Image (spheres, rainbow, N blue to C red):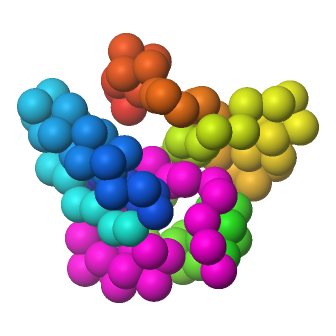
Amino acid sequence: MGKRVLVVDDHHDTVEILEQYLAMEGHEVASATTPEHALAIAEEFQPEIVILDISMPNIDGYELASHLRFKVEGSCVFIAATGHGSQSHVAQSQRAGFKAHLTKPVDMSRLLAELA
């Protein structure tokens, strides 16, 4: 059964690829390329899962996740999708409550496993 997934990344190409792939897999997908847009969409869309870039201008993904938690009713799973794959970054994602820390380019089979 498909889930409501919000994809947030400041790189338009990444957003497009993830959107298309997740939609083909049966998920309902919304996307944003700025933190501000993500906050506005989340309130209306109420995602079950947020795939979030960690390195964005103005606000990082960890801070954005904390704001999104207040916008989304019920539980929401956060998955980091980032170019930073060091152990310290993975540990930071875990401390911030992210279910998974995926490095770009995202391994789609691993992403699907995390969405299950």
Q: Residue at x 23, y 60 (%)?
A: 30
Q: Quadrant of residue 115?
A: top left
Q: Residue at x 49, y 76 (%)?
A: 35
| Residue 102 belongs to magenta span | no
Q: Quadrant of residue 38?
A: bottom left
Q: Nearer the viewer, residue 100 or 84?
A: 84
Q: Residue furthest right?
A: 88
Q: Residue at x 29, y 40 (%)?
A: 18
What is the number of callouts on the image?
Answer: 0
Q: Quadrant of residue 9?
A: bottom left
Q: Position of residue 78 (x, y in %)?
A: 53, 49
- The magenta span reads 34-58
Is residue 111 at least partly visible in the picture? yes
Q: Height in image: 62 above or below 50?
A: below
| Residue 47 belongs to magenta span | yes
- Left or right, 111 with reference to 65: left
- Left or right, 13 with reference to 74: left
Q: Residue at x 51, y 53 (%)?
A: 52
Which quadrant would the C terminus be assigned to in this image? top left
Q: Height in image: 110 above or below 51?
A: above
Which quadrant would the N terminus be assigned to in this image? top left
Q: Position of residue 114 (x, y in %)?
A: 46, 27
Is residue 3 at least partly visible in the picture? no
Q: Position of residue 92 (x, y in %)?
A: 82, 46
Q: Nearer the viewer, residue 3 or 62?
A: 62
Q: Height in image: 23 above or below 51?
A: above
Q: Height in image: 100 above or below 96?
A: above
Q: Position of residue 36 (x, y in %)?
A: 45, 84
